[in-house]
Amino acid sequence: MTQVHQFLPVLDRGDAIGNHAMALRGLFRRAGFASDIYVWRAGKGLKRECLPYQEHRAVSSRENVAVFHFSIGSPLSAYVRNLPDKKVMIYHNITPEEHFIGVSEHVYYIAKAGRKELASLAGRLDLSLCDSEFNRKELLDLGYDNVHAVPVLIDFSLLDVRPDEKVQMRYKDAWKNLLFVGRLTPNKKQEDVIRVFYYYKKFINPRSRLFLVGTPRQTPRYLTILKSLVERLGLPDVVFRGQVTQSELVAFYRLADVFLCMSEHEGFGVPLVEAMYLGVPVIAFDAGAIAETLGGAGVLVREKNHQAIAEMVDLLIADGELRSRILERQKQRSRDFQKIAELEARLLSMIRSVTN
Amino acid sequence: MGIFKADIPEKKLAEIQREIEQRIENRKAKLGDVRSAEKEAIGDLLDYGRAPVDKISYELYLARKFVKIFPEADAAAGERGPGLLMRLLRKVMRRVLRQQIVFNQSVLGVLEENEQRLTRLEKKLTEKDSEAR
């Protein structure tokens, strides 16, 4: 039996890449392939979901396929590059290292090393898949061939779970809630989300709060900077929620009146699709693959004018006609990502083309 | 040209952009320059991206981080450090040793690749042997 195994630097709870890998594992197994996930590091409570990559040597073979999820530098790059197995890379994009200057030296150098590793894999793979045309173009510029853009496989059943009751009870009131979901890292620019919220709360609607849902684990210094920002602005009701369970995440989406994304680098942006699916109007800064993921839905912002964006937040909440129109368009767009059977068939056919 | 883009009639979008501009103007007229007040409060907190960074490789960064050669004297504990000549010599030695570590890591990487190639060749030979039998 051909084996199709996946490689991830880190398998972490609530991480989009990790969720994508687990969805793929299910797909490969249903298709009759033996399939496991091999990692460099396993997040808390996930050791049973994966194996250390060093154990893969025992099953490595020319007849098998190694699917490598690439988003950061790691020892996996060299390991996978030298395998006799057929090699498929799923490129999720590496955040440019400049974003980590002054925040995390370690992540800066890992991201830098990752860029070098990415370049070294060109011409050594049987197939490369990307989450977006934005990512695909990056690989083509590095000299990769046989590169295809296939959207992330999102398990929408995870968004249909019951929202966490404690979160709902705590925040269910007449206040308006802004939300951003994503790791607390400088490229995601939660500082700009806070600055927009500052104008909204101080000058437009004081009965409002901001939820920032996402772990600061990789760059704890950025959380310190954000908390200092909140303090300097004298801004109450900014809720840093860290890593949350799936039902807590859904609860935050259900409480949100607007999803606000000021990220300056995204290879895809899974939370944008989640917000669209769960009926939260999106305002997002036009950077990276964001416009591509939104596909004309939501409200795209070309310039970070925090006051203007705060006013748009207010209009999206108060203007029923505008809100309905935006939500309707978002609903249409989210359906493109729900064509799971089609996406799965496409992915399987690509994997099979490599095994044949 | 406005800063927003959305899939709504152009006329409506233009109306929204004008309304937003008007609201900002009204606020300025009523409260003065709120942006300057915000920027003053923030100060240089968000200038973290301007911090200096060494243009070195990841391997050298790890070498510097994890390898402490000739640890510095603990002034707080009253330890006296070495003289100028010795400090210079130690600085040179640190650089040489760290480069040696980086070189060794590269060599280890090459040795690992060779080991994998040998394993593959071994497998091929074993397969050929079995076929021949």
Image (cartoon, coloured by chain):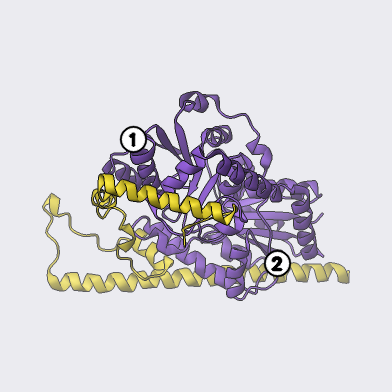
Chain colours: A purple, B yellow
Instruction: Give the residue at mark 2.
Output: A127
Q: Secondary structure at mark 1?
A: loop
In the image, is A244 to the left or to the right of A192? right
Question: Residues under labels 2 and 1: Cα distance?
Answer: 49 Å
- 2 vs 1, front mark: 1
In the image, is B119 to the left or to the right of A119? right
Q: Quadrant of residue B62?
A: bottom left
Q: Are marks 2 and 1 in contact (CB under 8 Å)?
A: no
Front in this rendered view, residue B37 or A30: B37
Q: Chain of mark 2?
A: A
The residue type indicated by label 1 comes to: Pro
Q: Secondary structure at mark 2?
A: strand
Instruction: Give the residue at mark 1.
Output: A236
The label on residue A344 is: none
The residue carrying pointer 2 sits among few (fewer than 14), some (14 to 19) or many (20 or more) residues within 10 Å by Cα, namely: many
Q: Earlier in the sequence, mark 2 or mark 1?
A: 2
Q: Quadrant of residue B58?
A: bottom left
Residue A305: x and y in percent read 39, 55
Residue at the far right in the pictured view: B133
Residue A56: x and y in percent read 66, 55
Front in this rendered view, residue A319 or A121: A319
Residue A127: x and y in percent read 70, 66
